[in-house]
Image (tube, rainbow, N blue to C red):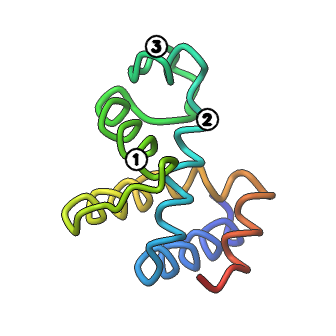
C-alpha cells in the first residue's frame, strides 16, 4: 500500500466513523464485488481478493440486502456495518471511482 493509499484509507476510516451513510456505502460496494453466484448463495466461492471473506459473506450480504431495501438498522447492526466497512476499507480505496466519491462526500 502506497503512502497515498494509506492517506486515503485513513481519510475513509475517519468518514466511516462519523457517517452511517459512508459506512453503508462501503458495505454495499464490497457486496457488489461478490460474484453473482456468491451473492445468490451468500457464500464466498472464489479466492479473488475482492468482496467478503468466507467468514463475512452471509452476514455482510444480509446487511447489504437490508441497506438496499432501506430498512432501518438497529444500533447493533450499525456497529457491525461500521466494523465491516473498516475491515474492507482497503478494497474500497482500490476502486478510484468509489473512493473519490466517498472521500469527497460530506454525509
Image label count: 3
Q: Residue furthest right?
A: 97
- 51 horizontally vs 98: left or right: left
Can you say whether 40 is above or below 8 in the image?
Answer: above
Q: CA distance from mark 1 to mark 3?
A: 22 Å
Residue, x 56% and y 29% (percent of image)? 34
Q: Nearer the viewer, residue 66 or 27?
A: 66
Q: CA distance from mark 3 to mark 2?
A: 13 Å
Q: Is disc 3 placed on a helix, strand or loop?
A: loop
Tell me the number on the disc at residue 66. Answer: 1
Residue 30, given in percent of the width and then of the height, sits at 54, 44
Can you say whether 58 is above or below 40 in the image?
Answer: below
Q: Residue furthest left?
A: 76
Residue 65, given in percent of the width and then of the height, sits at 44, 41
Tell me the number on the disc at residue 45. Answer: 3
Q: CA distance from mark 2 to mark 1?
A: 17 Å
Residue 44, given in percent of the width and then of the height, sits at 43, 20
Examine the image and state in which quarter residue 53 appears. top left
Can you say whether 63 is above or below 100 in the image?
Answer: above
Q: Nearer the viewer, residue 55 or 77?
A: 77
Q: Is disc 2 placed on a helix, strand or loop?
A: helix
The mark closer to the camera, 1 or 3, is: 1
Dots 2, 1 in contact, CB < 8 A:
no
Crowd around label 2: few <14 · some 14–19 · many ≥20 (10 Å): some
Tell me the number on the disc at residue 33. Answer: 2
Amino acid at each position: 500500500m502506497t503512502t497515498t493509499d494509506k492517506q486515503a484509507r485513513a481519510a475513509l476510516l475517519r468518514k466511516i466513523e462519523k457517517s452511517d451513510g459512508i459506512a453503508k456505502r462501503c458495505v454495499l460496494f464490497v457486496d457488489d464485488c461478490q460474484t453473482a453466484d456468491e451473492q445468490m448463495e451468500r457464500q464466498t466461492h472464489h479466492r479473488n481478493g475482492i468482496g467478503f471473506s468466507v467468514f463475512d459473506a452471509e452476514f455482510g450480504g444480509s446487511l447489504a440486502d437490508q441497506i438496499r431495501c432501506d430498512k432501518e438498522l438497529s444500533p447493533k447492526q450499525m456497529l457491525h456495518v461500521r466494523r465491516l466497512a473498516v475491515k474492507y476499507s482497503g478494497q474500497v480505496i482500490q476502486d478510484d471511482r468509489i473512493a473519490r466519491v466517498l472521500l469527497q462526500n460530506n454525509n
